[in-house]
Image: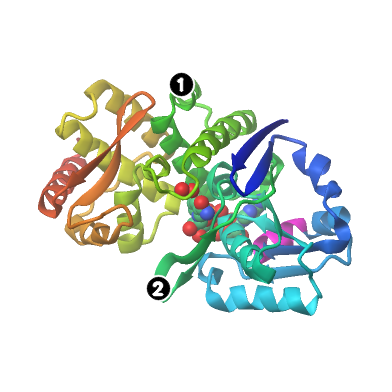
């Protein structure tokens, strides 16, 4: 068990990581003033735990599992239930679930009475290594993802890998996608990944690597909490193409799309002499340890069009965060036609099995 502290101007946020942290820290939360938000899958698995640890009278709001619940309807419903339960400014919202629960419950906590206490208990690998830490909250609105939100730091995050035991393999792959992204940003994480390439799903490895990913994100958030000076943007490595593929094809999980996006963007970085070939090959080996066959897309130009709306773009060029060398990344900006040309080239090579 280890703690990581993130100090931002308005909030000290403590992340408890490792096996046993749920049993150690969750019972200490103030039972009379808790409001738990979870989803239908997590509640089905862990209702007894919620009642045992927080008491069987604790108010629990359950959203249907899945991204489609991250919307205004459920945000309003959570806020209304908080009001109905007489929650006051000293109450604590407990977000008990994956990134969907964390994002909507975090936003509710930031809005209710202009802000109440927030504790994140992430139950997916993605939420443990990424979304529960750093204070980004959001819902999707009018078909646009994460467009209404706030920066609102949780006071505590309890990242206990015990919850990963019930997680479907697809969700483990999703979390590994973000972990490999961190590997391209951080030399320590990269070395651990390379040393454990045959063992990425083991409980012990996931516990160790989660700590390092949170540590990396904590440093980034301390330096650039509000995504203003460019450091936090690096957490978007692989995401420009990843998001575009996710939006266009929608079959793979977010983390898998990030990995596929990272593969395509590595091709671009090597072609433009930004990333060395042998380092790129080692990163590709990590990616294919999670997704054996990187897909090709005959119509990838359609997906590329969607990258036009990436939040990092400031003009008509497409912004990509790409690996440079171990622990270093760079932002590149490409005219749309060049970006499409390179994606099409990479896809054609994949189609030929190269
Ligand atoms: P999710 O919350 O939808 O969880 C994935 C699935 O796993 C769901 O079906 C859920 O019910 C189930 N689940 C959760 N915990 C479980 C457990 N322990 N055992 C069994 N099943 C379990 O998805 P996610 O991947 O955790 O999060 C994705 C969301 O996170 C997206 O909305 C994305 O926008 C957001 N996100 C936010 C940030 C941020 O910084 N705030 C960063 C990355 C992603
Ligand atoms: N997941 C990206 C960020 O928190 O900035």
Position of residue 336 relative to residue 107, above or below, is: above
**Chief SS of the magenta region:** helix
Q: Residue at x 62, y 77 (%)?
A: 76
What segment carries the magenta color?
39-46
Residue receiving disc 1:
191
Q: Is residue 289 magenta?
A: no
Q: Secondary structure at mark 2?
A: loop
Measured as percent of width and height from the top left, residue 80 is found at: 70, 79
x, y (%) of residue 351?
19, 45
Above or below, 91 relative to 169 = below
- For disc 2, the marked residue is 143
Number of marks in the image? 2
Which quadrant would the C terminus be assigned to in this image? top left
Residue occupying image coordinates x 66% and y 44%: 13
Q: Is residue 326 rendered to the left or right of residue 130? A: left
Q: Nearer the viewer, residue 284 or 27?
A: 27
Left/right of residue 194 with respect to residue 342 in the rendered view: right
Local secondary structure at mark 1:
helix
Magenta region includes residue 43: yes
């Amino acid at each position: 068990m280890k703690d990581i502290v993130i100090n931002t101007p308005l909030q000290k946020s403590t992340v408890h990581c490792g096996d046993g942290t749920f049993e150690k820290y969750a019972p200490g939360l103030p039972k009379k003033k808790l409001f738990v938000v979870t989803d239908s899958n997590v509640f089905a698995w862990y209702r007894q735990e919620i009642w045992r640890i927080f008491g069987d009278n604790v108010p629990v709001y359950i959203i249907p599992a899945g991204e489609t619940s991250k919307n205004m309807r459920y945000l309003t419903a959570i806020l209304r239930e908080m009001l109905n339960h007489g929650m006051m400014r000293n109450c604590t919202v407990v977000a008990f679930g994956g990134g969907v629960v964390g994002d909507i419950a975090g936003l509710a906590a930031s809005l209710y009475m202009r802000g109440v206490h927030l504790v994140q208990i992430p139950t997916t690998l993605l939420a443990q290594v990424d979304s529960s830490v750093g204070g980004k909250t959001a819902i999707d609105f009018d078909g646009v993802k994460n467009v209404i939100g706030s920066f609102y730091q949780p006071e505590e995050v309890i990242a206990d890998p015990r919850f990963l035991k019930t997680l479907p393999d697809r969700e483990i792959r999703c979390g590994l996608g973000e972990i490999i992204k961190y590997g391209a940003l951080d030399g320590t994480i990269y070395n651990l990944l390379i040393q454990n390439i045959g063992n990425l799903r083991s409980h012990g490895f996931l516990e160790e690597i989660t700590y390092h990913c949170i540590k990396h994100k904590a440093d980034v958030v301390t330096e650039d909490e509000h995504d203003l000076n460019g450091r936090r943007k690096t957490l978007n490595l692989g995401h420009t193409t990843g998001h575009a593929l996710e939006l266009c094809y929608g079959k793979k999980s977010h983390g898998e799309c990030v990995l596929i996006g990272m593969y395509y963007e590595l091709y671009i970085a090597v072609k433009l002499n930004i990333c060395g070939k042998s380092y790129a090959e080692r990163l590709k080996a990590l990616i294919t340890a999670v997704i054996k066959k990187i897909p090709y897309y005959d119509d990838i130009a359609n997906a590329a069009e969607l990258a036009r709306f990436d939040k990092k773009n400031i003009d008509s060029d497409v912004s990509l965060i790409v690996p440079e060398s171990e622990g270093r990344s760079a932002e590149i900006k490409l005219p749309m036609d060049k970006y499409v040309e390179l994606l099409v080239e990479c896809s054609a090579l994949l189609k030929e099995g190269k």
